[in-house]
Every structure is written in structure tokens, then in C-alpha cells.
Amino acid sequence: MTKTQAQIAPDLGDFLLYDGECPFCSAFVSMQRMRAAGINLKLLDAREQPDLVAAFYHQGLDVNEGMIMRLGDTVYYGGDVMNMVALMTGPTGLFNRVLAVAFSNRRVSLFLYPFLRTGRNAALAMLGRKKIEQH
């Protein structure tokens, strides 16, 4: 993370930027229990945030290749997002227990994330949905 990335849209506070048209991303975001764990994180559909997507893209973070999360002064990307979410939500409910086991280890998260991204890209292609534009 660079200081520049943390300064992108500081008025938004803490957020998770994800692809709202991806069925996997949307299911992941909707099944999280972050609010129940006391985490106030804005959930932002990247398709509705073109300026934010472009700002991160110009700093080297492609939302088509990974979710982006900002917590305080730190920006997380891809597998690191999965790792942080697993650590933040705790093992409440079956989905979160599976997530906690699979992604609470950063190395495992970074290893598994490319497979998740491949699944996302395949699902978007099968559904006839385009990748997010990043000008």
C-alpha cells in the first residue's frame, strides 16, 4: 500500500469495493457479519463508483483482479482482503466458519485468491457480463 492509495476518497471512510454484478462477490459481501462484529465498513459496488475504480487503477490496483478494502490508513487488495475479512468476522454461521478456516491464514488466502478470481471471470463470461471499465 502506498500513502497515495490510502488518500484516495478520504471522505468515504472505511470501505470494501467489490463487483456488484459478480454473483460470488455479491454473495460473499452479503453473507459477512461485519456489522454484527462491530465493524462499520461501507460496501461499495465498483460498477457504481467509476471515479473510485479509476483512481485505484491509476495507482496499480485493478478491481477486476481483486477486491479493494480500506481500513484507516491501510489499503488491502485481493487475497489480503479475504484474509482481513476472515479475521474480522469471526466464525459465526457456517459460511463464516468455512471462510475463517480457509482464509484466516494470509499465505493460504494469497494462494487461493487466484482460483477465486478465475471463477469470478468465468462466471461473468457465462452470464454475459463485462469486466468493470477503468478509465
Image: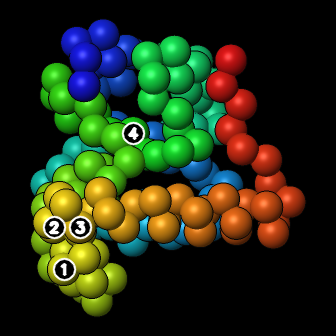
Q: Nearer the viewer's eye, disc 3 or disc 1?
A: 3
Q: Is residue 68 above or below residue 22?
A: above
| Amino acid type, label 3 | Val
Q: Is residue 135 left or right of residue 5?
A: right
Q: Which residue is mark 1?
A: 101
Q: Mark 2 and 1 residues: CB-CB less than 8 Å, in contact?
A: yes
Q: Residue at x 30, y 10 (%)?
A: 4
- 12 and 46: which is toward the camera: 46
Spatial separation of the CA atoms under disc 1 and disc 4: 21 Å
Residue 33 in picture, x, y percent from top left = 26, 67
Q: Which residue is mark 2?
A: 104
| Amino acid type, label 2 | Ser
| Amino acid type, label 4 | Ile
- Could you say which quadrant of the image residue 12 lies in? top left
Q: In this rendering, does residue 42 appear at all?
A: no
Q: Secondary structure at mark 3?
A: helix
Q: In this rendering, does residue 103 appear at all?
A: yes
